[in-house]
């Protein structure tokens, strides 16, 4: 199986062209027509590359891009925007938001394949993004979390939550900030969701031998990771 590419495109004709072109080049391609199904898919399988249209039926491509870049397990996956918006300002906005490339529609199939190869080649040479704190090692590139060589099995959301806390160690993060960052600015769930995830992470840390409680509850405000 080739490298996995997630393509978000609501035009079935363009989506089919992208799928066929890249599949014939040895890649495994999954096509989504809106953001909700995309984020459901990354909960179980993280791709090697995202292709994003900007104008989509639910959330636009830039909103999706922003959410990818604040999610620990996804922020280092390269992104190419493929859009009919061809103004220089549109390209600048997309690239400044974190996209690795911007391809304008209509596009040539050979150019698409060439750009995809270039992005994936650059990404292979990128240094692994990892952080160690309080004996806990987190590798966001490989979605690995360990404590003194003992693996900690975290879900995608648990990993993103712990990554956020660890990278802001000794800082109090408000519940609103955590929910907006990990679940997205349009998250409509109850804040109880955050408490449940914190509880699960604490239990998993305890199981691998973490004695001190590194995640502190700051009553009425939020949470803080103490090293």
Image (cartoon, rainbow, N blue to C red):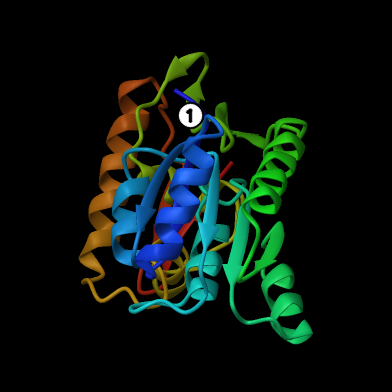
Residue 155 showing in the rendered view: yes
Q: Which of the image's four quarters has the N terminus?
A: top left
Question: Residue drawn at (35%, 74%), measured in percent from left and top?
Answer: 220
Residue 151 x %, y %: 42, 19
Judge from the rendering whether residue 4 lies leftward or rightward of residue 89; answer left or right.
left
Given residues 53 and 225, the one toward you in this image is: 53
Q: Residues within 10 Å of mark 1 (few under 14, many from 20)?
A: many
Q: Is residue 84 above or below residue 172?
A: below
Report the quarter where the C terminus lies. top right
For the point 35% across and 28% down, the residue is 153
Residue at x 56% of width, y 34% of height: 25
Q: Toward the viewer: 19 or 207?
A: 19
Residue 159, percent from left and from top: 43, 42
Q: How many marks?
A: 1
Q: Which residue is mark 1?
A: 145
- Label 1 sits on a secondary structure element that is strand
Depth check: 221 or 40 in front? 40
Name which quarter of the figure residue 14 lies in.
bottom left
């Amino acid at each position: 199986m080739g490298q996995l590419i997630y393509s978000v495109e609501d035009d079935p004709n363009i989506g089919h062209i992208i799928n066929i072109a890249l599949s014939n080049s040895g890649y495994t391609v999954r096509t989504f027509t809106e953001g909700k199904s995309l984020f459901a898919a990354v909960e179980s399988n993280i791709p090697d590359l995202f292709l994003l249209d900007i104008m989509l039926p639910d959330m636009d491509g830039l909103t999706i891009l922003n959410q990818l870049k604040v999610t620990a397990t996804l922020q280092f996956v390269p992104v190419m925007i493929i859009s009919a918006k061809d103004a220089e300002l549109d390209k600048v906005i997309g690239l400044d938001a974190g996209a690795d490339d911007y391809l304008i529609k209509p596009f040539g199939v050979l150019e698409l394949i060439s750009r995809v190869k270039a992005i994936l080649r650059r990404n292979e040479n990128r240094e692994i993004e990892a952080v160690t704190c309080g004996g806990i090692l987190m590798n966001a590139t490989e979605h690995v979390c360990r404590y003194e060589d003992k693996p900690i099995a975290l879900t995608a959301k648990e990993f993103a939550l712990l990554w956020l806390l660890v990278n802001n160690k000794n800082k109090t993060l408000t519940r609103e900030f955590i929910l907006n960052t990990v679940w997205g600015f349009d998250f409509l769930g109850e804040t109880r969701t955050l408490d449940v995830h914190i509880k699960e992470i604490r239990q998993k840390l305890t199981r691998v031998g973490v004695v001190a409680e590194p995640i502190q509850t700051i009553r009425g405000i939020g949470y803080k990771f103490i090293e």
